[in-house]
Amino acid sequence: MKSPRSQPIGNSCLRAYVLATAICGGVVHLPAASAADADLPAALQAKVDASLVKAVAWLKAQPRKGGAESSLTCYALLKGGVPHDFPELKRHADSLLRKMASGSYQGISDPAFHTYEAGCDAMFLEALDPVLYAPQLQEIRDYLVRRQLPSGGWFYPAVPPGPSGDTSITQYGVLGLWAIQRTGIDVPRQVWGNIAKFHSATQRFDGGFTYHPYAADAQATKSTAAMSAAGLGSTLVAQLILFGPNAEAEPREPSRRRFGVLEQLTEQAPKAPRKTSGESGVSREVFKKIIPGAERAVERLFNDGLNGPHPIYFLYGCERAGALLGSSSLGGLPWYERGAEFLTQRQQADGSWEVNTSYSAATQTAFAILFLARATKSLVPQSRTTPRKVGTGLLVGGRGLPTDLTNVNLDDGSVKRRVPKQGVDTLLTELEQPTEASVREIQQTIVEAVELDRPEELVGQTERLRRLLDHPKPEVRQVAVWALARSGDLRDAPRLIAMLQDPDVVVVWEASLGLCVISRLPMGVAPAGEKEPLPIMPPGAASESAEPAPEFDVWRQKTIAAWDAWYQQVRPYEERDDQRQLRHR
């Protein structure tokens, strides 16, 4: 009998959900997101954390001028940890609704930058509330697809005759469509295939990219650091959509179980691509041609990028490429450490950046926040080659097995680590900056400490748990969701609803179970007008496959809508008559 590839912590706990401990607590604004990186020196990590706090505080206080900059800065605030109910986010979202009041995407504030604006608008709305703003995201999708050129790229409104495209503009078309794709809205595969063809046709002989590859001047021949990072990132997004996060891996049969206690390391087949309509017209070989050369070009041009006219814009491109590659290095270059050093040294006393005059201080600060907070990392599905440690205490493939076997128990065929004397506070400190070997141990130990031994120790930890919802490791987000659901504070329900959008299916499953706990609806929630509750487990989540079932997106949309409607009925009185209630009327 096959064992599930992974389970949420709360799966076994739901049967005993009445043991959840209720604690009192107010709504606490999230601080700037931690960008904890296992490879970053501790002193530099402390500077990064302090830099993020200052930067987010400065950007929150700035006026919004409209256009692409406003959507970019609001998106950066969300990724920097600002809560979704921050009034400035609502005001900007309302301005976008007015722009699309006619039922189509129009009213671009500056036609020359139409694709930049559309891409940033999509990123912001998807991050703020992908369900509420699904109609607007569909309109932006239609707009971007219409604007894609036959070459596969995007350009300014006045398109010259013949093949055309701008690598910088194209990356924002790609970012906007990727945000829309993540909501489950269909973006035709041919669009992604054409993006790959554009970058295949315009890659320079040295592996890099330039701004205007079809122009008749020097911009057509000389690779630049910023455009090489942009081209690499856009190509990696197209590869992710078409072939999944393990695009270069070959399918392998899962290994058999051994010994009955430890399961042999299971090599998973690559994730199937998210279902999109039509054919892409490109093969994996196209990406194998583009990506290695582009990565080498970014490594070679890195110093040029930092010393060039757009260093922070360049670093945000590196952040996307590094996250999509799943690596802290580009070639042999520690891109994040180098970029973090650059930014922390050049931040102004007020928390902003103004390294050059090509962009406003607000735009440069937004790019810096997105880099330091590792904004893209949580958007990329993690390719798991080993099943995650589950709530029953199973240790898979020997990973997570304590080196000191005096600290483990054998319980019903499973190896369990004994709950240590340190409290939940100490365990959460370990969880905030875990190593790869420790995260599974910490996860299970927190569960055992809270559920079986010291549930009262969750008191006072809600702020830290909320911050951990944005952690790049899915295992950490999973335990944060589990614990937050058992905090007993109903005002955290919207955060759990938001986690149903997580790119990791097990985190989504955990959030679904957590909502059953915090709502005291152990059978789940039913859509409006229906008696039968929706399934608690996402379709296909417990299978051996690394990719959820095709009907997963439909389940997710319905589940979010049903829980959102439930929360409108039960939420605290101080939250009544707000934006969400008005939109439901």
Image (cartoon, rainbow, N blue to C red):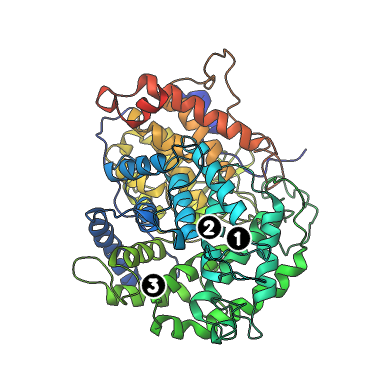
- Of labels 2 and 1, earlier in sequence is 2
Q: Pick the residue in front: 469 or 98.
A: 98
Q: Pick the residue in front: 444 or 26.
A: 26
What is the quadrant of residue 57 in the picture?
Answer: bottom left
Determine if residue 153 is in view: yes
Q: Residue flagged by tag 2: what amino acid is it?
A: Leu
Left or right, 223 with reference to 113: right
The vertical placement of 315 against 567, above or below, is below
Position of residue 269 measured from the top left corner of the image (x, y, whole percent): 74, 54
- SS for callout 2: helix
- SS for callout 1: helix
Label 3: which residue? 312
Position of residue 354 measured from the top left corner of the image (x, y, whole percent): 28, 73
Left or right, 250 with reference to 165: right
Position of residue 100 measured from the top left corner of the image (x, y, whole percent): 45, 41
Number of numbered tags placed on the structure image = 3
- Of labels 3 and 1, earlier in sequence is 1
Determine if residue 264 is in view: no
Label 2: which residue? 175
Real-space Cα separation, disc 2 to disc 1, in angstroms: 8 Å
